Image (spheres, rainbow, N blue to C red):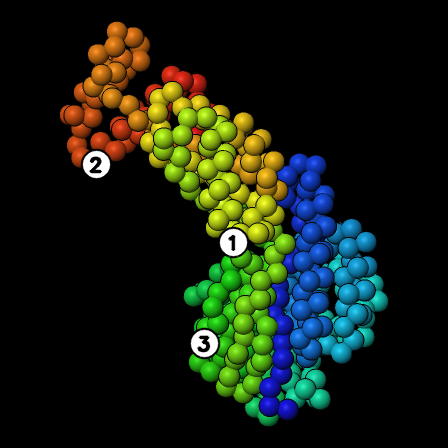
């Protein structure tokens, strides 16, 4: 056999909950399982030879038993695919691990906590790697097992690519990769996907998490699927996320009411994220110059958005469009504030001017009661 078909996934974090969703965090938790089922379906439909899971399959070893049962059931539903699992820092291979506590399906192979190798003779492939034993694992300069070039050699491992061995989460350095003898290294741990890279003769990538779990995990998420052979690596990204986390800046200049603002937001995201726009989670940043009389009530905008999308939060970064000179002539507290600030801005060094202008805008917002303590 000249090539082997793989699906590389990692960091599914089954059982993870997004607490900011409140009562809906429970159903969101179940969605991690649904995304996992989607990965199993992709595996089945594409006749994948080896499914590689590079750690953090479960969010923790104490995840609900029903989730564990369903995962093992799914594994058993693809008997023609070999499944290789390397435990990560969230689901280390200790006595609490579901992979230690329960009987494993026949097609599931769990990499040991020492350097190890599983041979699939009929696929002419060996899968190397090792599991986290505890939450932390120190890296090593070289992998200790030799490879045989007559096989397609793949590694499945959770860890952090870096220049030194200082990480508590299994540092993987260039020397380790160059001397590994691997054709491909399927990495887990970093939730942001990388392109397929190459160090020495070894291809490698992080596939990222298949389902984002917060606004620090934005955009399309998925897995890598394709063929590995000696000297070639043809993998394609396949999206899997049920919902995307999206951060979108929207200019609301000229709009006056929460209703108008919400309508503009919906129109923008509908156009950009098409038919599935309603499924996503949005962090909307309002920008632009708005009239002083504009009513930018974030709670009302959020309520209106939640009529149309799964989740939205709003941050107001607009600036007030005002005639400062005119305002400075007012015999009011606001007028005096503006007059003083304009004088400061005039006298300030160029570098200081922007900061003072921001302070002026924030001050004006405070006069209309729009400033909260977490404003940044
Ligand atoms: Mn992870």
Count of numbered tags: 3
Q: Which of the two labelled residues, at mark 1 and mark 2, occupies the earlier sequence position? A: 1
**Within-10-Å neighbours for mark 1: few <14, some 14–19, many 20+:** some
Disc ID at residue 198: 3
Disc ID at residue 351: 2
Q: Is mark 2 within 8 Å of ligand 1?
A: no
> Residue 158: in sight, yes or no?
no
Label 2 near label 1: C-beta < 8 Å? Answer: no
Give percent across and percent down for residue 191.
Answer: 55, 58
Label 1 near label 3: C-beta < 8 Å? Answer: no
Q: Nearer the observer, disc 3 or disc 1? A: 1
The CA distance from mark 1 to mark 2 is 35 Å
Question: Tag 1's secondary structure?
Answer: loop
The CA distance from mark 3 to mark 2 is 43 Å
Q: Which of the two labelled residues, at mark 3 and mark 2, occupies the earlier sequence position? A: 3
Q: Which residue is drawn at 25% across and 21% down?
A: 323
The extreme right residue here reads: 103
Question: Tag 2's secondary structure?
Answer: helix
**Within-10-Å neighbours for mark 2: few <14, some 14–19, many 20+:** few
The extreme top residue here reads: 331
Give percent across and percent down for residue 313.
Answer: 53, 36
Residue carrying label 1: 219
Q: Residue at x 63, y 54 (%)?
A: 242
Q: Residue at x 51, y 54 (%)?
A: 219
Q: Residue at x 64, y 39 (%)?
A: 21
Q: Which of the two labelled residues, at mark 3 and mark 1, occupies the earlier sequence position? A: 3
Q: Is mark 1 within 8 Å of ligand 1?
A: no
Disc ID at residue 352: none
């Amino acid at each position: 056999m000249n090539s082997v078909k793989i699906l590389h996934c990692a960091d599914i974090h089954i059982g993870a909950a997004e607490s900011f969703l409140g009562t809906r965090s429970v159903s969101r938790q179940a969605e991690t399982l649904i995304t996992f089922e989607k990965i199993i379906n992709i595996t089945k439909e594409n006749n994948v030879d080896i499914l590689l899971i590079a750690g953090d399959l479960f969010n923790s070893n104490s995840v609900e038993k029903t989730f564990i049962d369903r995962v093992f059931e799914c594994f058993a539903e693809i008997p023609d695919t070999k499944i290789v699992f390397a435990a990560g820092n969230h689901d280390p291979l200790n006595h609490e691990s579901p992979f230690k506590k329960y009987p494993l399906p026949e097609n599931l192979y769990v990499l040991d906590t020492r350097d190890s190798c599983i041979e699939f003779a009929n696929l002419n492939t060996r899968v190397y790697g090792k599991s986290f034993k505890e939450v932390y694992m120190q890296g090593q300069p070289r992998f200790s097992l030799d490879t045989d070039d007559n096989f397609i050699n793949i590694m499945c491992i959770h860890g952090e690519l870096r220049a030194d061995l200082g990480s508590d989460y299994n540092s993987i350095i260039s020397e380790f990769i160059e001397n590994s003898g691997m054709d491909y290294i399927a990495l887990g741990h970093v939730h942001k996907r990388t392109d397929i890279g190459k160090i020495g003769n070894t291809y490698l990538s992080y596939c990222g998490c298949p389902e984002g779990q917060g606004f620090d995990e934005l955009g399309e998420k998925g897995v890598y699927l394709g063929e590995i052979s000696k000297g070639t690596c043809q993998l394609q990204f396949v999206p899997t996320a049920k919902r995307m986390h999206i951060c979108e800046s929207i200019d609301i200049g000229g709009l006056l009411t929460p209703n108008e603002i919400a309508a503009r937001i919906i129109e923008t995201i509908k156009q950009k994220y098409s038919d599935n726009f309603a499924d996503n989670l949005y962090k909307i940043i309002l920008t632009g110059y708005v009239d002083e009389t504009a009513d930018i009530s974030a709670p009302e905008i959020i309520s209106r958005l939640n009529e149309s999308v799964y989740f939205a939060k709003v941050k107001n970064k607009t600036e007030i469009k005002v005639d400062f000179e005119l305002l400075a002539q007012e015999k009011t507290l606001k007028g005096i504030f503006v007059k003083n600030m304009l004088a400061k801005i005039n006298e300030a060094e160029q570098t200081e001017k922007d900061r003072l202008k921001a302070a002026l805008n924030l001050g004006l917002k405070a006069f209309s009661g729009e400033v909260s303590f977490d404003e940044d």
